[in-house]
């Protein structure tokens, strides 16, 4: 725990006086009814340079997905609103009579929109240039981020490593490496559908049909696996139980991403009338800066992602962990102009991209006079048991972004209370509805909110609240009550 006097230092760093207000009674009552002690909650409310309320705001706490506000704020300021990731198809080989006489390089550049449709469009561009056959290998270049495959050897966050929220990004993440699965059952039969179609990849199931609630189908889910036979064919196998007379669609991350890219590329290229004689392999480290153009190559096709403010809305409104982690790594790799609409970060940086990103964030916060003591940012998404930030520190980030030239872009990325994103069903009919913009955070032991709430005089307030407790799931009403308390205040 931080020193008791640190709140004064944190607030003084923001140009604020030390606060003495206690938790609002409406919040305290809801904490007591949920059996959550008040010291499990840290909260702060700022209106301009006035501290309206502060309770445990100096404590370093688990923020869950409210940590995404740090990543998106620094990302927007460091990279700028015109930043776009990019994917390229490159080669050093000649094209003779429709044959590419060498390798094709698929080069990743933190393109958050690189999906199956984009790949097909890029390959159609090759066909439009008269290329029919690739007489070489497909080389997957993920070298922009280091390590190039951060997913390898990473311990799973929880028991659901295959689900979308747990996908660990790299610089060339194709279609988020996901298989879309549809399960539909009768009383006696289970039917499976898998998309996208992948060459020599099939899906099967040993799931048992049971009488049960379709809405609780995940209760019987067990981690799937994929098997490779001697011929190289892959089979995805689903395990567990599934309710009778039920239909569900979801996405899973099961295949190794080299296998996934290999099979999706071959399927798409074949459908477009092309062929490839070689294999698919990962690009080795070159020793060059990751943003350096591969020597002796030329670009055949490319794709540019949406501008950063559009990606920010997906990150914050739907709380997308994979996009947030991609942006976090981009902060350590790229800046606002040059290759990929960006350039190498101008700093003496360690090779590890995540470490470099943390240093950029620390430097940004210090420039804004935000105390970073005991703050720990691991992957930038908040999907973490080790990430820590004090409510006062996060309030400092929100206050700094009020003064940013990109404040409209940042604020428009946050969920609108009672209207959209993760706040669409919360505080319906309250004074905060359609007025406040709040990022939420939830883990099994964390409930958190952070954002902007206009008070009754339409003065915008910064509001941050976190509950860290084994009973945190019962505390959502308490943090919502704080938002409503601010929205009703007129003093």
Image: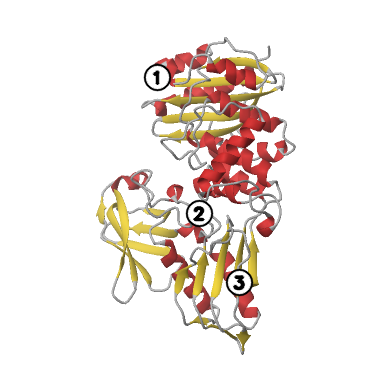
Q: Nearer the viewer, residue 144 or 393?
A: 144
Q: Is 386 on the left or on the right of 92, as rendered? A: left
How much space separates mark 2 and mark 1, taking CA atoms? Answer: 42 Å
User: Is disc 2 in contact with disc 1, using a CB cutoff of under 8 Å?
Assistant: no
The residue that disc 3 covers is 90
Mark 2 surroundings: few (<14), some (14-19) or many (≥20) residues within 10 A: many
Mark 1 surroundings: few (<14), some (14-19) or many (≥20) residues within 10 A: many
Q: Where the N terminus falls, by quadrant?
A: top left
Q: Nearer the viewer, mark 3 or mark 2?
A: 2
* Element type where label 3 sits in the image: strand
Give the residue displayed 63% in from the left and 83% down from the top.
130
* Up/down of 334 relative to 132, above or below: above
Mark 2 or mark 3, which is nearer the start of the sequence? 3
Which color scheme is applied? secondary structure
* Element type where label 2 sits in the image: loop
Q: Residue furthest right?
A: 405
Q: Position of residue 11 (x, y in %)?
A: 61, 19
The residue that disc 1 covers is 36
Q: Residue furthest top?
A: 20
* Up/down of 475 relative to 334, above or below: above
Q: Nearer the viewer, mark 2 or mark 1?
A: 2
């Amino acid at each position: 725990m931080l020193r008791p006097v640190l709140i004064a230092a944190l607030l003084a760093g923001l140009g604020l006086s030390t606060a003495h207000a206690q938790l609002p009674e409406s919040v305290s009552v809801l904490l007591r009814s949920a059996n959550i002690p008040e010291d499990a909650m840290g909260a702060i409310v700022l209106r301009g340079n006035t501290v309206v309320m502060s309770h445990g705001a100096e404590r370093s706490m688990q923020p869950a997905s409210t940590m995404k506000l740090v990543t998106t704020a620094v990302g927007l300021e460091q990279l700028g609103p015109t930043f776009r990731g990019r994917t390229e198809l490159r080669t050093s080989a000649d094209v003779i009579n429709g044959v590419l006489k060498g390798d094709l390089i698929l080069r990743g550049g933190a393109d958050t929109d690189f999906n199956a449709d984009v790949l097909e469009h890029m390959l159609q561009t090759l066909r439009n240039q008269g290329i029919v056959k690739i007489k070489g290998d497909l080389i997957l270049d993920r070298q922009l981020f280091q390590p190039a495959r951060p997913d390898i050897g990473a311990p799973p966050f929880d028991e659901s490593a295959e689900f979308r929220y747990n996908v660990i990004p790299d610089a060339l993440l194709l279609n988020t490496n996901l298989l879309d699965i549809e399960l539909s059952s009768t009383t006696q039969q289970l039917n499976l559908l898998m998309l996208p179609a992948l060459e020599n990849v099939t899906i099967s199931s040993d799931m048992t049909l049971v009488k049960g609630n379709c809405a609780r189908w995940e209760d019987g889910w067990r981690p799937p696996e994929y098997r490779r036979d001697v011929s190289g064919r892959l089979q995805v196998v689903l395990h567990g139980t599934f309710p009778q007379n039920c239909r569900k669609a979801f996405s899973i991350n099961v295949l190794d991403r080299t296998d996934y890219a290999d099979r999706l590329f071959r399927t798409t290229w074949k459908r477009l009338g092309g062929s490839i004689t070689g294999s698919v392999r990962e690009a080795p480290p070159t020793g060059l800066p990751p943003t350096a153009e591969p020597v002796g190559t030329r670009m055949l096709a490319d794709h540019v992602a949406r501008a950063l403010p559009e990606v920010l809305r997906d990150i914050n409104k739907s709380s997308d962990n994979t996009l947030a982690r991609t942006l976090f790594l981009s902060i350590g790799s790229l800046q606002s102009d040059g290759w990929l609409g960006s350039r190498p970060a101008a700093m003496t940086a360690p090779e590890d991209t995540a470490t470099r990103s943390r240093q950029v964030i620390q430097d940004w916060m210090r420039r804004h006079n935000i105390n970073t003591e005991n703050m720990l940012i691991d992957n930038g998404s908040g999907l973490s048991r080790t990430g820590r930030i004090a409510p006062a520190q996060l309030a400092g980030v929100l206050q700094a972004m009020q003064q940013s030239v990109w404040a409209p872009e940042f604020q428009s990325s946050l969920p609108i209370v009672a209207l959209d994103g993760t706040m669409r069903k919360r505080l319906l009919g309250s004074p905060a509805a359609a007025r406040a913009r709040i990022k939420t955070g939830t883990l099994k032991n964390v409930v958190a909110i952070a954002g902007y709430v206009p008070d009754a005089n339409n003065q915008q307030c910064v509001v941050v609240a976190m509950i860290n407790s084994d009973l945190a799931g019962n505390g959502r009403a308490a943090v919502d009550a704080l938002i409503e308390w601010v929205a009703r205040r007129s003093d």
